[in-house]
Each structure stands twice: as C-alpha cells, then as structure tokens.
Amino acid sequence: MSKVFRYFRKNVFVDSKIVIPIVVGIIIVIVGILIITNQESEIEDTLDKKIVPIEDDNPYIQEKYDEVGKIANSTDYTQLPREWRASGPFSIDRSEYAIGEKIFIVLEGLTPKEKGEIAVMRPLNATHYTVYLTIPFDGVTKSAFNNYIEPQISKTRGICSVDDLTGKWALVFRGTSYSNLNFEINEKVVPGINIETVC
C-alpha cells in the first residue's frame, strides 16, 4: 500500500506543472460565474423598479418650463424686408435682425485715400460696447467688396447666451469720418439655430 501511495503522491500531486494551472483555471471559472450571476440580478432589479413622477409644483422645473415657453413664443420668425442703410460708401441691408440672420455689409466707391477697418461693436449694456470683430479695408487694393457677419453664441468670444446677442449693435468705420451705422438684434430666432447657453 505504501508503494501505491508513494507513486500517486509523486506522479500526480507533486507535479506542480499540471496541478497549479488546473486549480487557477477552476478558480477563474467560479469567479466568472459569480460575477455574471450578480450582474444579471442587478439588471433585473433595475428593470423591476417603478418610475416615480416628479411633482409638478417643483419651482425649478416650472421656471425652466416657463423659460422654454418664452423662447418658443419669441421665435415667431419672419424675415424682414431689406432696407439698405448707408454711411458714405458703407451700407447694411437692414436696421433689425433676428438671432441667426446674416448681416450683409456692402462697400462700394471707396477712394484710394481711404484705409481703416470696420469695427463691429456688440453691446455690453445700455451705454457700453465691445468689439465683436474687425474687417479691414483699403481703397488702394479694393474700392468695393461685400462681406457678412453672423453673430452667434460663442464661449471664446464671451457670448454665453441669447441675452449677450440681443440689443443695439454698431458699425464704426475707423480711419474715416463716416458716421456709425446702428442696427439691432431682436429676440426672434431663425429656425434651426442653436441657442443653448455655453458658459
């Protein structure tokens, strides 16, 4: 009997090259089965839960609902007819624009002596402006050109919401004695324009 036991111990249990991988494999299979069983029960628990409606008298939800309604009511968009307004050789196509409309700037009849830039000024409040962008012009290189701008919500420009776009804007013709051209961007929104707050 001792010979059989010695043979069995020597050839089967002592040979770690066979026993260790088998034991590790069995442990991995058991752990995998436990993980899969646990995940299935979590999914079933989630599916069995009841959906509880949020109470309608929550002031935050009502405020957001009113805000969406205000935007929806202010988007009765119809494009206004063109009414070209000019200051010297500079002109724009309207005095009022909706959010998302392009503002067309036409320059024609610029003399070779006239050089400068069009500063598009965005309102900060009722009395102060900031430069939205500038468009250079030089009568020596071009006496006429067309351009357009499309003011949009932009985090990099510091325009976080529609409130930063609406108001009285101005075109200032730096380097000339021409008077400014003023225009307004109202609260109406061109359909399809993204007006989500970005800041």
Image (cartoon, rainbow, N blue to C red):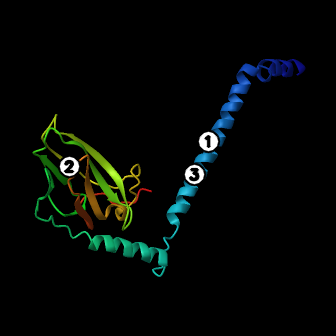
| Kind of residue indicated by mark 1 | Gly
Instruction: Depth check: give the residue in front, 20 or 103.
Output: 103
Q: Name the residue under label 1.
A: 32
| Kind of residue indicated by mark 2 | Tyr
SS for dot 3: helix
Q: Residue at x 55, y 53 (%)?
A: 40
Decide if residue 3 is in sight here: yes
Q: Which mark is residue 55?
A: none
Instruction: Depth check: give the residue in front, 37 or 122.
Output: 122
Q: Quadrant of residue 130?
A: bottom left
User: In the image, 26: left or right of 141?
Assistant: right
Q: Earlier in the sequence, mark 1 or mark 3?
A: 1
Q: Which of marks 2 and 3 is nearer the N terminus?
A: 3
Query: In the rendering, at what x and y percent does residue 101 appear?
Result: 21, 57
Q: Which of marks 1 and 2 is nearer the N terminus?
A: 1
Q: How far apart are marks 2 and 3 (CA)?
A: 57 Å
Residue 10 vertical position relative to residue 155 in the rendered view, above or below = above
Q: In which quarter of the image is residue 56?
A: bottom left
Query: In the rendering, at what x and y percent does residue 107 appear?
Result: 14, 47
Q: Residue 39 carries which label?
A: 3
Q: Quadrant of residue 198?
A: bottom left
Q: Which residue is drawn at 22% across and 48% down?
A: 176
Query: In the rendering, at what x and y percent does residue 73 appear?
Result: 27, 74
SS for dot 1: helix
Decide if residue 190 is in sight here: no
Which image quarter holds the N terminus? top right
Instruction: Depth check: give the residue in front, 106 or 49.
Output: 106
Q: Mark 2 points at which residue?
A: 148
Query: In the rendering, at what x and y percent does residue 141 appear?
Result: 16, 34
